Image: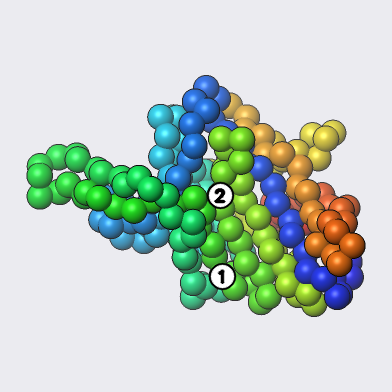
Amino acid sequence: MSLRPYGLALFFLPWAAAGQPKTGLYFVPNNGQAAADVRYTVQSPHLKVYFKQTEILFTVGEATLGFRLLGADPSAVIESRRPLAGRANFLLGTQERWHRDIPVFEEVLYRGIYPGIDMSYGSAQHRLKSEFIVAAGADPGLIRFIYTGVGRPQLDPSGALLLKTPQGTLREEAPEAYQQTGAGRRRVESRFEILADGSIVFS
């Protein structure tokens, strides 16, 4: 796949928990309300997400699965983007354990997670949306990830990724990729590919 002279944006819509209400998702910095290795959190009545340096944990009901980037830069900078007007408050336990007036954001960005590649998380249609932004000349083949806490992933005929958990099968939609050129957006053919070790790449 040639990426010159333009970069590539490659994104997919991860699964949404069944019955998840259609409310906006927002990202909250960890100010002590989560484990020390968590950088940001997303919470809804049916879904909790914990963003770590090179891994993201999803909890749906009693099931927890991890999204782990392989070969990623563990020192990549994680930053919040597009602040929202609201604030988050965590008033659990005794008052000295409360965490109040925490700013919230629309997006988090992992800058330089691979050479020339950023990864962002936002929301689309009330679901989490992840996107890899590949600079011109960078290699999208570096992106490789694995899911933990699930059976071996499978692909359905549409190209979506199926992840089996004790709570049922979760579905991750097939990826879409495009280049933004001087003549406008140009679609790039892309799909998930499952390797022998169960890790996943984009072809």
Answer with mark 2 or mark 1, whichever residue precedes in sequence: 1
Label 1 residue SS: strand
Residue 79 appears in the picture as rendered: yes
| Element type at mark 2 | strand
Spatial separation of the CA atoms under disc 2 and disc 1? 14 Å
Q: Position of residue 40 (x, y in %)?
A: 41, 55
Q: Residues within 10 Å of mark 2 (few under 14, many from 20)?
A: many
Q: For this rendering, which residue is in front, 6 or 119?
A: 6
Q: Is residue 160 left or right of residue 74?
A: right
At 45% from the left and 30% from the top, the residue drawn is 46
In the rendered view, would you say 34 is above or below 170? below
Identity of the residue drawn at 34% across and 53% down: 103
Relative to residue 149, is residue 31 depicted above or below? below
Q: Position of residue 146 (x, y in %)?
A: 63, 54
- Give the residue at mark 2: 122
Amino acid type, callout 2: Gly
Q: Position of residue 145 (x, y in %)?
A: 64, 57
At 66% across and 34% down in the image, what residue appears? 171
Q: Does 187 sit above or below residue 92?
A: below
Res. 133 image quadrant: bottom right
The C terminus sits in image quarter:
bottom right
Amino acid type, label 1: Arg
Q: Which mark is residue 111?
A: 1
Q: Nearer the viewer, residue 187 or 201?
A: 187
